[in-house]
Image (cartoon, rainbow, N blue to C red):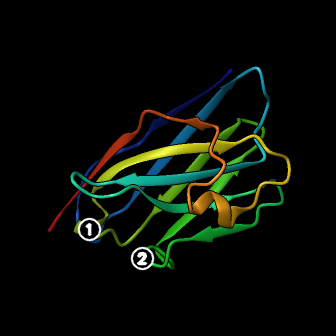
Amino acid sequence: QVQLVESGGGSVQAGGSLRLSCAASGYTYRTPCMGWFRQAPGQEREGVAAIDTAAATIYADSVKGRFTISQDNVKNTLYLEMNSLKPEDSAMYYCAADRYPLCSVSDILRGNGIDYWGKGTLVTISS
């Protein structure tokens, strides 16, 4: 059983930065694909970024150039570096993982094939 625990959320002003972390633990050492999602109150969940075993990445158009997804396979931790934050970035951010060895980042970004979810970390951006 895999458990994902997010951290690093908080409240910052527009233009600021945050670094989210997702620590993975359980009986598997590492899942092939991982991603970040976010959901604001009253809004649909959206994929933010995803990364695979080969470190290929994909980003939502709304965060391209501002967010960077990365992973530390030794620590089994996923990161999301968020820069130039905007009020519209405010949301609960969730870490997700796909155990399928041939997973694709494009599918992950669309929310397809997700096997594990974290409980989320809250990000609030004030103007």
Q: Judge whether 51 appears above or below 23 on screen.
A: below
List x then y, in percent, for residue 17. 37, 62
Give left or right: position of 118 versus 57: left
Q: CA distance from mark 2 to mark 1?
A: 10 Å
Split into 4 quadrants, where in the image is the C terminus? bottom left
Q: Judge whether 24 appears above or below 67 on screen.
A: above
List x then y, in percent, for residue 116. 60, 35
Q: Are the residues at dot 2 and dot 1 in contact (C-beta closer than 8 Å)?
A: yes
The disc placed on residue 22 is: none
Give left or right: position of 114 versus 89: right
Query: What residue is at 56 percent from the left and 62 percent from the top?
Result: 110
Identify residue for label 2: 62
Secondary structure found at label 2 = loop
Identify residue for label 1: 88
Q: Residues within 10 Å of mark 2 (few under 14, many from 20)?
A: few
Q: How many marks?
A: 2
The quadrant holding residue 15 is bottom left
Q: Mark 2 belongs to which amino acid? A: Ser
Identify the mark nearer the N-term, 2 or 1.
2
Give left or right: position of 76 versus 111: right
